[in-house]
Image (cartoon, rainbow, N blue to C red):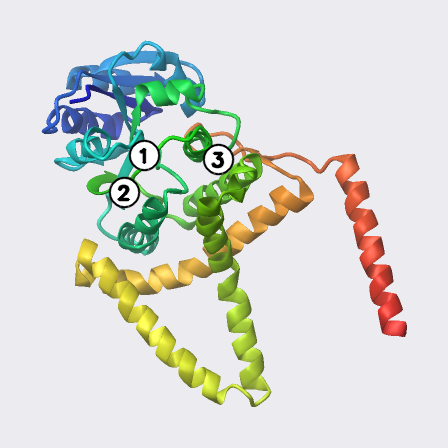
Amino acid sequence: MLSATVLIPAHNEEASIADLVPACLDQSYPIDDVIVVADSCSDATADRAREAGARVVEVDCQDKATAQNVVLWEIESDVIIGFDGDTRPEPGCIELMMRDLNENGCDATCSTILPMQPRGFFIRARRFSYALGRRWWRLCQAQVGRIQVLTGASYAFKTSVIKAVGGFPSGLISADMDATWAMHAAGYKLGYAANAVALTLDPESFTVWRAQMRRWASGYAQNMSKYRRQLLHWRSLLVVGTALFDLVSLFWSYAFFGYLIATGHGQVLLTVYAIYFAAHVVLNIGLVTSVVGIREALLGFVPWFLVNFYTRWLYIAALFREWVLGRHYASWTGRQGRATVITPMTRRRKIVLAAVFAVVASAAALGYAA
């Protein structure tokens, strides 16, 4: 049986750390140590963590990945179990994640995440999305062998594996996805412990939710660019290609259907689509019901459906900004209170894009004239 240490990076988490540490110590799986890395805290996070029974290391890194790396090389346990400071594992969470490593031959895994708060428009939308992932897309990714991201809020990495890829990466806006694809590139086996559950504090306001989604979208684009050679593998192509197709299909399909209806050719297609949409609703609500119950599934469908449109737009905008314009998210308004910073477009890229635009415009003009 592999030994395990819990590692918790925390910034101003005095309100939640006192519940998180005991929740880790009370798990059914034996834990060697619980280490809280209090990063740039201006509150009583460190004191509350010590009182709860954790070993506390205080640092001033102002970066989650860097803070974890401060203690990573000192950890001798076989496995590092990681939780965000605003997350709390449910009973059995660690044991279920460790089963992937002890019995299923995985080198890393993560749990299911669900919102801690009981209600709210964005909370219910996020709960529906997380529950759908547990029963569908995350399970599919795990079966294919290319899970897109081992969530940093609740994960289990073999210590030797995260050390072998150079520790927790901090070069991109989304460190947990960076670590995930670094492990894919190194040939490690990654899993998903669907039945392990951890609760986390999710954004309740539009402003905070949007800031988080813009960061996630930018991190996705940056990671896909960094690991583009890995995308040539058939497993990666299947997972990422499906995700990108799903990302754009919502808009062009609705636009196409609208055009057909407006031109009088969409009656049959509308009937077919109505049947498809009804089946889609029933399937999604059924899958989510098996995780959070029928009441939450019904209450969460409309928020999730509406938010889904804007979420996809944020991802498309991030892909265009990162890949085409070359303007990269460098920091964000989040846990460390930083202002959002997006790098400017380089002079070389401006020249290239201007040249491409000129060529396309000229070709269009010639075609129109002809």
* Residue 360: x %, y % from top left: 81, 58
| SS under mark 3 | loop
Query: Can residue 157 be seen here?
Result: yes
Mark 1, mark 3: which one is toward the viewer? 1
* Observer-nearest of 343 and 117: 343
The Cα atoms of the two marked residues, 2 and 3, are separated by 22 Å
Label number found at residue 333: 3
**Tag 2 and tag 1, C-beta contact below 8 Å:** yes
* Residue 367: x %, y % from top left: 85, 70
- Packing grade of label 1 (10 A; few <14, some 14-19, many >=20) is many
Amino acid tagged 3:
Thr
Amino acid tagged 2:
Ile
- Packing grade of label 2 (10 A; few <14, some 14-19, many >=20) is many
Left or right for 175, reference 354: left
Q: Which residue sits at x=15%, y=32%?
A: 95
Task: Report which quarter residue 203 is drawn in.
Answer: top left
Left or right for 183, reference 35: right
Q: Which residue is mark 2?
A: 113
Q: Which residue is mark 1?
A: 153
Between disc 2 and disc 1, whose residue precedes?
Answer: 2
Q: Is residue 14 above or below residue 97?
A: above
**Tag 1 and tag 3, C-beta contact below 8 Å:** no
Amino acid tagged 1:
Ala
